[in-house]
Image (cartoon, rainbow, N blue to C red):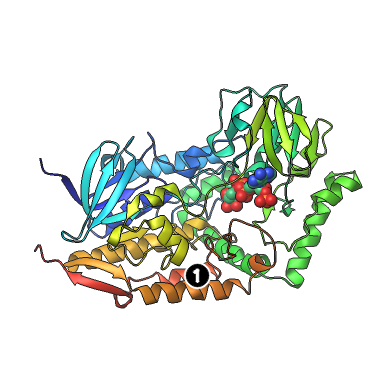
């Protein structure tokens, strides 16, 4: 039996995968399939359905450049609308016919003799000249290994896998973590639970949120004159880019932002002791800066306690903190973030000599967040060090998609059998990222998911997003070892 073959296999039908598919179609490449483990597209915006889930980037900037959305109901898009938007894009570009739902990538190996990837999925085997990994940046929930968690009698779940069957009304709930997800879900659940314990290991900087409803006349304007939304988008992009100077550096602007954040706490929290515990002691921007007008008022509610301690264990009836306190809980919700290094999805990818991609990424990063030496014909969307905090991640993703489509088109037009980034190019790139990071606020002395345990930046692009866009505009073949396609 011959194995099904495609020029390209894309893994993941979130923003990364569907945007890559559209870019390939625009280059005239239609021999591809998209593998999607779930039953629907959407990626992180399908998986994160916790109450209050919303993007902290303005809606006019949070869409794919080739598919504007005049229908956003708020100036910062909410999760159900982002999910619907992604589904509309999939329909608009007729991508369902390319997509294999309920098909999980189990294993992929580079076969040097045929210069192809051998791909094993939950629904059978495939081969491909090119593998595009678009499995998302924050797609593997991290739950701390707590002593005794198995013994806990109540429900537990992660914010990114919200259990909508659990009714929290009147319950005693423990939320572990005070990052971006927690800050959004806590104000939603606090009024309906009986009691809420918020376990804060490190406070976050939370500044006021400028969200508002998009008016009907604005929606009409965007629908009738798309150029008006385009202008708004361009203006929003420029404003977001200017935030880079505030959010990535220490200095006067950063101090002003901290003053704003402190006022945000004091406005809502009357208890000076709680104000003290909620005020971070590290530089603003060292961890991701959060937006909320409702978080601090929720913490000031009489049915909410902020427990300034880490969680180290669980008992059948509650939670054990680092200082040994045992606090009762009916439900434990982990808002504890995502795995960034040594991710399971990359452990399944084996390049030359059987090296797995997770180890390679952890050791060497990825050139432009896209390619890695030892992994020919493999392209990653949203790979290491391509995240951003100051502007839309979609801008970075789209830059990578254009780069990858250009690379695949070059392979087709020039009959290339394989392309593999030169190790010295990749290492030079990774070192440059690290040296740029030392001058940024992320290296100013906090613990964040931007840096690994060795203190190396594994997550974010340290520059302005337009500089990344400029670098990825064209496939730079000279940075790659290329071989001719001998099968032709
Ligand atoms: P996160 O920002 O990494 O926050 C994880 C939280 O869990 C932190 O407060 C962390 O404390 C805490 N934690 C971890 N282990 C703990 C333990 N054993 N005991 C007590 N606390 C513990 O995760 P997230 O909130 O899911 O957000 C991750 C990223 O997703 C964000 O940075 C953002 O990029 C993205 N996101 C974006 C949005 C948005 O657009 N609005 C919304 C949600 C998520 P420490 O700080 O001490 O480590």
Residue under the image location 30 percent in, 37 percent down: 122
Residue 333 coordinates in the image, percent (x, y): 64, 34
Screen quadrant of the C terminus: bottom left
Residue lying at 75% horizontally and 34% vertically, measured from the top left: 197
Write down the quadrant of residue 379 in the picture: bottom left
Q: Is residue 128 visible?
A: yes
Q: Is residue 417 above or below residue 97?
A: below
Residue 295: x, y in percent?
74, 43
Is residue 23 found left or right of 6 in the rendered image?
A: right
Identify the residue under disc 1: 466
Q: Nearer the viewer, residue 466 or 486?
A: 486
Which residue occupies the foreground of this view, 465 or 38?
A: 38
Horizontally, residue 59 falls left or right of residue 34, namely right
Q: Is residue 210 visible?
A: no
Total number of numbered discs in the rendering: 1
Provide the secondary structure element on which disc 1 rests.
helix
Asked if disc 1 is less than 8 Å from ligand 1, the answer is no
Which quadrant is the N terminus positioned in? top left
| Side (left or right) of 294 relative to 342 | right
Residue 356 in the image: state x and y as whole percent: 36, 56
Please tell me whether residue 34 is drawn above or below residue 235 in the rendered image.
Answer: above
Q: Is residue 328 above or below residue 160?
A: above
Q: Quadrant of residue 172?
A: top right
Q: Residues within 10 Å of mark 1 (few under 14, many from 20)?
A: some
Position of residue 388 measured from the top left corner of the image (x, y, whole percent): 55, 61
Q: Is residue 77 above or below residue 166?
A: below
**Residue 236 left/right relative to 86:** right
Most foreground residue, 294 or 138 = 138
């Amino acid at each position: 039996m011959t194995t099904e073959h495609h020029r390209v296999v894309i893994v993941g039908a979130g923003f990364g995968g569907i945007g890559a598919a559209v870019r390939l179609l625009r280059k005239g490449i239609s021999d591809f399939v998209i593998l999607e483990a779930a039953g629907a597209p959407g990626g992180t915006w399908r998986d994160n359905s916790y109450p209050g889930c919303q993007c902290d980037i303005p809606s006019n900037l949070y869409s794919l450049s080739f598919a504007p959305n005049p229908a956003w109901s708020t100036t910062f898009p909410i999760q159900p609308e982002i999910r619907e938007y992604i589904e509309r894009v999939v329909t608009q570009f007729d991508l369902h016919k390319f997509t294999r739902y309920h098909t999980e990538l189990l294993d992929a190996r580079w076969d040097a003799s045929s210069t192809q990837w051998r791909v094993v999925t939950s629904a059978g085997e495939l081969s491909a000249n090119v593998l595009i990994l678009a499995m998302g940046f924050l797609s593997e929930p991290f739950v701390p290994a707590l002593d005794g968690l198995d013994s806990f009698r109540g429900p537990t779940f992660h914010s990114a896998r919200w259990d909508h069957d659990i009714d929290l009304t009147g319950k005693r709930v423990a939320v572990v973590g005070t990052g971006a997800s927690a800050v959004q879900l806590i104000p939603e659940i606090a009024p309906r639970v009986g009691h809420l314990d918020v376990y804060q290991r490190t406070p976050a900087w939370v500044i006021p949120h400028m969200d508002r409803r998009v008016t009907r006349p604005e929606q009409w304007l965007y629908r009738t004159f798309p150029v008006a939304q385009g202008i708004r988008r361009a203006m929003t992009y420029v404003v977001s880019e200017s935030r880079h100077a505030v959010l990535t550096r220490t200095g006067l602007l950063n101090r002003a932002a901290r003053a704003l954040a402190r006022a945000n706490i004091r406005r809502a929290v009357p208890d000076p002791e709680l104000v003290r515990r909620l005020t971070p002691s590290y530089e603003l921007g060292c961890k991701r800066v959060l937006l909320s007008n409702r978080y601090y008022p929720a913490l000031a509610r009489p049915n909410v306690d902020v427990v300034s301690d880490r969680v180290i264990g669980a008992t059948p009836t509650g939670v054990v903190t680092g200082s040994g306190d045992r606090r009762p809980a009916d439900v434990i919700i982990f808002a504890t973030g995502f795995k960034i290094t040594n991710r399971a999805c990359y452990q399944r990818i084996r390049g030359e000599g059987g090296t797995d991609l997770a180890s390679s990424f952890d050791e060497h990063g990825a050139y432009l967040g896209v390619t890695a030496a030892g992994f020919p014909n493999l392209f990653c969307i949203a790979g290491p060090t391509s995240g951003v905090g100051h502007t839309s991640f979609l801008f970075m993703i789209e830059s990578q998609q254009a780069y990858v489509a250009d690379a695949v088109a070059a392979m087709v037009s020039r009959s290339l059998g394989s392309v593999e980034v030169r190790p010295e190019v990749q290492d030079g790139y990774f070192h440059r990222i690290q040296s740029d990071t030392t001058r940024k606020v992320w290296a100013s002395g906090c613990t964040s998911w931007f840096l690994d345990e060795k203190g190396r930046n594994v997550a974010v692009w340290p520059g302005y997003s337009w500089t990344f866009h400029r670098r990825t505009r064209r496939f730079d073949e000279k940075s790659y070892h290329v071989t001719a396609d001998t099968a032709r």
